[in-house]
Image (cartoon, grey):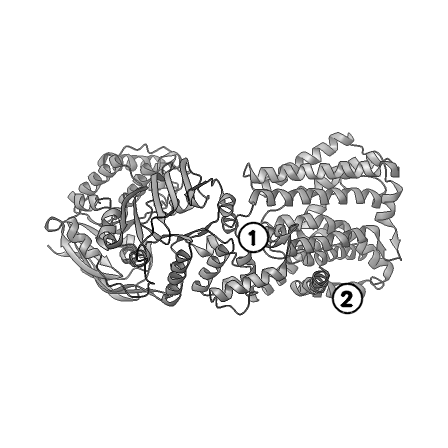
Amino acid sequence: MESKTKNWVSEIFPEIIKSSLLVYLILLLLLIIAEIVSPGFLSFLHLGNVLRQASFLGIVAIGQTFVILTGGIDLSVASIITLTNVVSAQIMNGSNENLLLALVTVIAIGAVVGLANGSGVCFLKIPPLVMTLGVGSVVQGIALVYSKGAPKGYAAPLIRFISNEKIGGLISGAVILWLILGLLTIVVLKYTTFGRNVYALGTNVIAARYAGVNITGVTLCTYVLAGIMSALTGTLLVGYTGTSFLDAGTTYTMNSIAAVVVGGTSIIGGRGGYGGTIAGAIIMTIIGSLLTIVHIPEAGRQIAQGLIILCLVLIYGREKTRG
Amino acid sequence: MKYILEMKKINKRFGGIQALQDVDFSCFKGEVHALVGENGAGKSTLLKILAGLYQKDSGAISFNGKAVEFKNPQEAQRAGIAMVYQELTLFPDMTVAENIFLNQEPCNRWGLINQSEIKRRVTELITKYNIDLNPDDLVGYLPIAKQQMVEILKILAREPELIIFDEPTSALAKEEVHKLYEIINALKKNEKTIIFISHRFEEVFAIADRITVFKDGKFVATVLTRETNQDMLIRLMVGRPLKDIFPKKLVQATKKIIFEVKNLNVKGKLSDISFQIREGEVLGIAGLQGHGQTELLKALAGILPKDSGDFFIKSKPVSIRNPIDAIQAGIAFVPEDRKTQGLLLNLTVRENIALKSLYLRQILNFILLDKEREFVNRLIKELSIKAHSCEQQTVNLSGGNQQKVVLAKELGIKPRVILFNEPTRGIDVETKQELYYLMRQLANEGSIVIMVSSDLMEIIGMSDKVLVMYEGKISAELTKENISEENIMRGAVGIA
């Protein structure tokens, strides 16, 4: 068992770099550009801020990576984040004692919504795009009803500490959580039967079925995971802002998909992995923050962000076909 | 009488396979001409060249006394040659009339489609050929047989001189078959020429004036229907030497029955299938395409849910409702199309071979990678799969090696029963031979080997026992010296 552990550790890190070398090069390039455009970008303080923001997106993107690898997509993550953001703030109500209850509740909510998504896809045969769009809309509505349009409550000190304070000035608790979950994701995808089945399903669903892969089980699991990861982010965001908002999650659907795709995972499934998504999440965060720093108005920011994503995917797609 | 169509020295290759070799074929004006032959004899290829769907490599075609060369189906249609395809090419959300006049709609002077004119002309066609169709019905709601009629009307609306039917009755019920005969007779009266491919002797003898036999991409003979009979046709269709690429068969089957199927039924696909396999026997399942062979294997593999029927392995009943049950019962399945059903092409040889038996090498869902590599490398060696390493992507392997990867994946579950569907399709002769020896070895070691194949040579060369299927039933059960091309063909066309 000891040699096995060593084996994994020595394999995982090169694996992240090897399988997504290009996206890490792009990340490096982007960092250099950022430093030129806005001197001081590479300071510890600022990088810490970028990482802290990226961790929220990165955690959502864990679920999104699983779902996209199976050949699905989850458009409901934004709504789940918003609902869990509102619910957890209200339950916490500024007290550490309520934190556990809040966490259990939101994780249950995430799991139930994920189960609904997965059931629609598996049993009702509704295309993931449509199913998760519909469920997302319902969940957003529930958030509105629950909060009566005016979210109440505020963050417990502990969650505020986790999401905000940077240990050693660089790394926040949320980043550490992201790191742990991220490594777990890579291990699960690469070293478990479940992970292998996720790729099999996304590559060729018929061959996977013939090979005895439990298609329904695997699909349900990925959507439930996506729901739970979004719920975690929803809660962490309460800590980050101190309170809750009805548009807390809005940007996360598109950004999580972008992080996955920019990270080199094929949008039709079967190819890629979380190693690239990590870089994808950081890239998406840097682009957002850079465009803010150089004082581009919101409209211009959105246009620029869309174009940059398209360019990145184009570069990446070219590389893939050549290889 | 003069020829309306002459095809001379037609050659066509697909990759390494010579689909047509110096084929001559000609037709008189106003005749009904049937093309017969085994699967892969080249009938469809020849007619698709005629219809402009494929391009010939060499040879000459003359139609109506003029040399012609069709680059696409549209050119052939303009010249008066039209083909009714086996697959339906209709739009389900359009009406019968809209489908028939698709892309050749009559227009009024404003350039808009003249709906009433379309309807008038469709009604005219329907009365002319006495077909029970309503021009306003949506095609998607019609039964398949009626859709087939729409397909035929679509061709007739273009007033072609020569009409090609590719297995026109495969989707039709008895009454509709007679309706089709009437249509063909009506066309004949109007001096149209008809060529059709058929696997059913009944209809060949019912409507054809002349019959041309193909075999292995070559022209064999053209005969007058009234001067021939079924036996003669079958003899023309078969009769080639068996090469010694097959391993030795079982000398004497033991009495021990190791696999049994009782009264297997799948509605509309299989009816009342029962058979037994003795220890060491290789069972071959033959028949013309689409008579239930693939469905039988899929039912055994738990992929196609059965309505009734029982399976017994070594006298013990096994319950199979889905692929996972089948794996637990030790039933492996090598599907017919390795690219779409067997392999994860983007993934590595290792991931593919390991996929089906992951459960054998895991602790708490964690894959034991060392064991996996060892296992995969052992199978690569045993089956002599030619790959740079177990980390090579399967998409880059040759067809034969891909097929071996599929087989290795199946062998991973240590199967007691192995189902092969078209195991050697599209692979080279050497690998074929290797696979034959492997199959025989598996049978000798006590596994139950069942093989569906449309390659008669392979069925005859490999099987100790042959089941022939016709319309979802077993039409013949052959053993030993009874296993002959003639007997198989008889069963395959339902006259056993």
In percent of the image, x 12 and y 51: which residue is there? Answer: B228
In percent of the image, x 43 and y 63: which residue is there? Answer: B399
Nearer to us: label 1 or label 2: 1
Q: Mark 2 lies on which chain?
A: A
Q: Mark 1 lies on which chain?
A: A
Q: Is residue A118 left or right of residue A285?
A: left
Q: Is residue B304 left or right of residue B152?
A: right
Residue type indicated by callout 2 = Ile
Please say if A108 is above or below B477. above
Q: Name the residue under label 2.
A: A32
Q: Which of B483 and A156 is in front in this view?
A: B483
Residue A216 placement (x, y as % from top left): 57, 42
Secondary structure at numbered mark 2: helix
In the rendered view of the protein, which quadrant contains the C terminus of chain B?
top left
Residue B58 placement (x, y as % from top left): 28, 67
**Alpha carbon distance from label 1 to label 2:** 38 Å
Q: Both on one chain, marks 1 and 2?
A: yes
Q: Is residue B202 visible?
A: yes
Residue A157 placement (x, y as % from top left): 89, 42
Q: In this view, does B82 lie to the left or right of B366?
A: left
Q: Mark 1 points at which residue?
A: A200
Residue B362 placement (x, y as % from top left): 62, 53
Q: Nearer the viewer, residue A141 or A48?
A: A48
